[in-house]
Image (cartoon, rainbow, N blue to C red):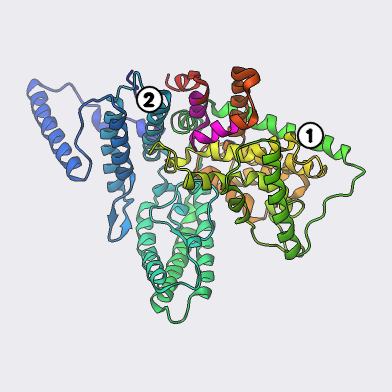
Amino acid sequence: MIFFLPRPFTRAADTAVPSELTTTKPTLRQVFCRLTFFLWAVSFCEVSIVGAGVPAEQPPAGSYQTLLTLFEDWREFQKPRLVNGIPDYSAAAMSRQHAALAVYQKRLTAIDTAGWPVSQQVDFHLVRAEINGMDFDHRVLKQWTYIPGFYAMVWNSQADTPAREGAVVYGAIELWTYHFPLTAADASKLASQLGTIPKLLEHARSNLVGTARDLWLGGIRRMKEQRDDLSELLKQISDSQQDLRANTVRAREATDKFVAWLEREAPSKNQPSGVGIENYNWYLKNVHLLPYTWQEEVTIMRRELYRAHAALKLEENRNRRLPPLSPVATEEEQNRLFQAAVSEYMAFLQKEEIVSIHDYMDPALREQIGGFIPPDQRREFFSEVSSRDQLVMRTHGYHWIDLARMKLEPHQSPIRRVPLLYNMWDSRAEGLATGMEEMMMHAGLFDDHPRTRELIWILLAQRAARALGGLYMHGNGWTMDQAVKFASEWTPRGWLNENGNLVWFEQDLYLRQPGYGTSYLTGKVEIEKLMTERARQLGDRFTLKLFMDEFNAAGLIPVSLIRWELTGLDDEILSMRK
């Protein structure tokens, strides 16, 4: 069976026909000359593409090894080229990359997967979706053109997902991987990395010609965060590490100048920032492999929002005679409760036979204790939740178990062994982490924590409210200001402060990465559906532990593909191929 890539949507501006192309009918001589020129141009382009490092076209083949070879070549091609030590995102470079993408599309469609096991066909669709992801980046998202925050290089905390959320510049500095005081080798490495920031930000100025207002303003906020992170880094650098200190100062100064430039340009940025409903639908279907449309996601998010608020009121009524949960008062108390919560959660998973227990699970959870925020300081939303019961966010901490499994029990497929590109893992990673909160409540984890059940519904309401903000921004019906206000107003108890950093960070992320804001709940819904279907298939043989183990074994891939692999049901994938 041969799979064909879908015909992509383009922006309206990209489909307009230039007036110079509407000419009169050419003569026979003109046709001959143009054909001769065309054949010469094609041969020139083929030489140029191969010479640029793109492998020559390969003959059609139907072996799985052909797919693995294509995957290796594709992953190398996907990286931007380095020029003077920085990634080249110039218009010319991106145009060349998009043109060369056709080679990989052609190689993929030449692969006949007929007779392959389902697991190998799943891998084929993963490669197909990644290639579609690059195509969407070039046609629609164009983060190097529209998103100033894309050029932020410094990240001071670890992501709890397989890769960074949203598009991130190639060569980003994961500052959290360094341990202070730095060794001489690490100081030299970090100095070299920081030394690229001034050149990168100068390069960014020539690339950022987009006029999307909310993405531009979000970039200003992100670059100010980088400036602050670099200021904090300076406090940790030894006086003897002069090269590192000098490069850090230069990086901070360059970031300051970049922020000033962004602010000067901001008044001219007056266009919507969303990708539009049609592009959003294409992206869900062809990149994230999610069997929903924009409108269906709106319906799901609204249903979850109302369900969460109604359930919260029922829970509050049930617990009305119990004392309210009080936030922790000291760091010592928080640490003690955190350790106790990990122990309680792990014991529950084992006793209730939720999932097979492995040695890496407990330490994976314990390493993520987080910082303490005193009662007299403003807490962001998740701090409000955790400060009242540390057990709640340990369920969402299944993220860290996923990452430990990915590292210590690598998948047999090389394609699933590494993080998927374009955040394609979001329905699985965020969907399960979010789903574990409510699933563990129903399984009995909070039976001895009655008021903690209220926190689960508050979490659900916040996820649904912020997701709706992202949807309406991409539909170009709301600005980010409106999305922030809605998410804040619809989060119970006023815990999502409209003036806080979190709500702005989240809405900016969901605008930069279509489909991410909804993935927490669409992923949860997909997992609930899959659990139901698997239980119907297995009947009396179904156990939660069996389901969780086989679900985990499939890897961090879109839930629609896990469903196909576990149940043999390919209707979702086929519906997304039409």
Q: Residue at x 52, y 70 (%)?
A: 231
**Residue at the spot 41% in from the left edge and 71% down from the top edge:** 187
The kind of secondary structure the magenta stretch mainly shows is helix
Q: Position of residue 331 (x, y in %)?
A: 72, 64
The reply, left or right, for residue 113 in relation to residue 283 is: left
Q: Secondary structure at mark 1?
A: helix
Pick whichever of labels 2 and 1 is earlier in the sequence. Answer: 2
**In the figure, is residue 33 to the left or right of 147?**
left
Residue 496 can be seen, yes or no: no
Spot occupied by residue 83 in the image (x, y as percentages of width and height)? 27, 57
Q: Is residue 209 above or below residue 490?
A: below
Badge number at residue 311? 1
Q: Few, some or many C-alpha atoms within 10 Å of disc 2 (few <14, some 14-19, many ≥20)?
A: few
Amino acid beneath label 1: Ala
Magenta residues span 547-565
**Residue at mark 2:** 6
Query: Toward the viewer: 10 or 521?
Result: 521
Name the residue: 36% across, 52% down.
207
* Camera sees residue 448: yes
Residue 322: quarter of image: top right
Residue type at the position of mark 2: Pro
Q: Is residue 511 above or below residue 257?
A: above
Q: Is residue 561 magenta?
A: yes
Label tally: 2
Q: Secondary structure at mark 2?
A: loop
